[in-house]
Amino acid sequence: RKEVEQDPGPFNVPEGATVAFNCTYSNSASQSFFWYRQDCRKEPKLLMSVYSSGNEDGRFTAQLNRASQYISLLIRDSKLSDSATYLCVVKTHNNDMRFGAGTRLTVKP
Amino acid sequence: DAGVTQSPTHLIKTRGQHVTLRCSPISGHKSVSWYQQVLGQGPQFIFQYYEKEERGRGNFPDRFSARQFPNYSSELNVNALLLGDSALYLCASSLLSGRAYEQYFGPGTRLTVT
């Protein structure tokens, strides 16, 4: 079992749609959680940290469920510019950052 | 402010050779991490350095080594290159180590081993 698992997609959605990505992690000692986005042949860029109480940044909402070892990202009112690969990242106690393989999103006009 | 910079951008090497990749963190960031990303996968953690000390190591062979300098820049060295080392090598910097920190990535060095 991979330490961080994501549905690879692809998710193809129309503009304006709401889309949700899920991520599960296996290490219960994981301490910090993040979502990154990565455009084709570019470096990952931090989208948002994920806090225990859940957090929102504009159209993006992240949730953490420690009991189920589950992280989610919700994107509302999708834009064409949201097309990218979304990476779930989990930091363990020894500073090891584990990335999922990513979920690819394409937003279509 | 300048972001994380890496050099070179691209590199072509032959099997058995060694390579040195360089990274300069964002000004004020003391932690640098290295990752390997092959096509279709997420980045794989190689090393983390904080205040010039190794603070984390991923599951990579001893052919991979790194160091951090007093100015917080870092080098990643790979010896006895294999075809399978062909990948995008990413450097990320962060403000501090510990329980919660956010990493910012450089554009990467694309290494091709022939």
Image (tube, coloured by chain):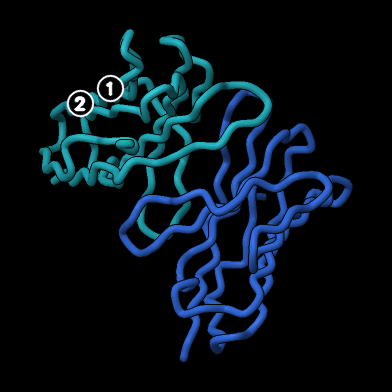
The residue drawn where x is 42% and y is 22% is: B28
Distance Cα–Cα, label 2 vs label 1: 6 Å
> On residue A106, which mark appears?
none
Going by the image, does B93 lie left or right of B3? Answer: right
Quadrant in which residue A78 is drawn: bottom right
The residue drawn where x is 65% and y is 30% is: B100
Going by the image, does B51 lie left or right of B13? Answer: right
Identify the colour of chain A in the image.
blue
Identify the colour of chain B in the image.
cyan
Which residue is disc 1 drawn over? B75
Q: Residues within 10 Å of mark 2 (few under 14, many from 20)?
A: few
Image vertical order of residue A32 relative to residue A21, above or below: above
Q: Where residue A72 appears, x then y in whole percent?
A: 72, 60
Res A3 seen here? no
Q: Where residue B101 appears, x then y in whole percent?
A: 59, 32
Looking at the picture, do discs 2 and 1 lie on one chain? Answer: yes
